[in-house]
Amino acid sequence: MSQSEAVKAEVKAVRDLRNAVIRYAERMRDAMAGARRDAAALLKRAEENLQQRKARMDRAMRELQQARAALAACRDPRRAAAQQCAVAEAKAHADETRQACVRAQQAVRIAAAAQSDLLKTMQSLEAVVGEHSSVSSSALASLEGKLAEIDVGGSVGHGIVRGLKAAAVTADLLRMSFHVGEGTIAPVYQTTAERFTSVSQVLDEKAAHLQQDWGDNDLEQREEHSGEVPGP
Amino acid sequence: MTFQQTQRAVETARAELARAQADTSGWAGKERRDFDAHRMKPLAAAGSKLTTALQDAQEAQARAERLM
């Protein structure tokens, strides 16, 4: 494979990887947005269920009080037995609705805890995905651009290829020197971004300078004859 | 979409990212290895953590729904 073909293959690989990273980040963001909606919907359903259970329990308690009041007011011994049965039935129903209410409260607690845990996890994941996909994408775009320039330039040797690749990745790693969540992302990011620009500029200038000095000759040939003094 | 469907979508995205990594061997060398270690690995790990979190949410949903 010629140098040009190798660079072309590298450009394609870098471009494909960049697209894959962008697509992955989008899918992760979509998934997290969907999960956030699902968690909110679950909590809402649990809360609505609790309200319904409370309303049923309140109704059952009122019916129990009415049955007890009716029993207390009953002066007819023949109807008292029927009133006692009504009270027992109302009490059983009230107990049942109270238990359902307790279960509904537990469901709300579980849904709220699930939502809280999920949001907490996703908050940190969003920061990680946002940070890494953004920096990856820009570093890969930069690398792709530089490789494409090399390819257009034609006869630039491995030394410059390596130098330029190292520039893009060095900038990427410089940005890795801090971590998400430490609270100083913005200023450090800006500083490293500035360093990246300056590293790229230096290498661009160096590449241009070398090309100018060595004309159309291949750098690798120069490297092979490193003992010779380049001609004017 | 349910937590389960979201979880499947994340797993698909993770698999596609891993495939893209394997399919882009045209860019190789130390820089690529560094890039994979410092950038791709955290991205993949985020997907893995999200899958776990969604699994937990799905289980919590099942518990809550049994109580409703």
Image (spheres, coloured by chain):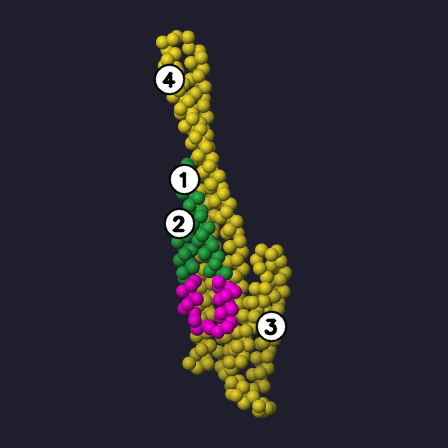
Amino acid type for the residue under numbered disc 2 = Gln
- The image quarter containing residue A204 is bottom right
Q: What residue appears at the point 58 percent right and 76 percent down from the top-left corner? A: A203
Q: What residue appears at the point 51 percent right and 82 percent down from the top-left corner? A: A157
Residue in front for this viewpoint, A193 or B4: B4
Q: Colour of chain A?
A: yellow
Q: What residue appears at the point 45 percent right and 19 percent down from the top-left corner? A: A65
User: Chain under label 4?
Assistant: A
- Magenta highlight on residue A48: no
Q: Nearer the viewer, mark 3 or mark 1?
A: 1
Q: Is residue A212 left or right of residue B5?
A: right
Categorize mark 4 by other alpha carbons within 10 Å: few (<14), some (14-19), many (20+). Answer: few
Residue A142 pos. (x, y %): 53, 70
What residue did someone put label 3 on?
A199
Which of pointers 3 and 4 lies earlier in the amino acid sequence? 4
Instruction: Assess whether mark 1 and mark 2 are in contact (beta carbons under 8 angstroms).
Output: no
Amino acid type for the residue under numbered disc 4 = Cys
Categorize mark 1 by other alpha carbons within 10 Å: few (<14), some (14-19), many (20+). Answer: some
Which of pointers 2 and 1 lies earlier in the amino acid sequence? 2
**Which chain did the image draw in green?**
B
What residue did someone put label 1 on?
B65
Alpha carbon separation for disc pair 3 and 2: 46 Å
Residue B7 at least partly seen = yes
What residue did someone put label 4 on?
A85
Residue A153 pos. (x, y %): 51, 80
Q: Are marks 4 and 2 on the same chain?
A: no
Amino acid type for the residue under numbered disc 3 = Val
What label does residue B4 carry, if any? 2
Question: How many circles with numbers are drawn on the protein?
Answer: 4
B48 shown above or below A173: above
Alpha carbon separation for disc pair 3 and 4: 90 Å
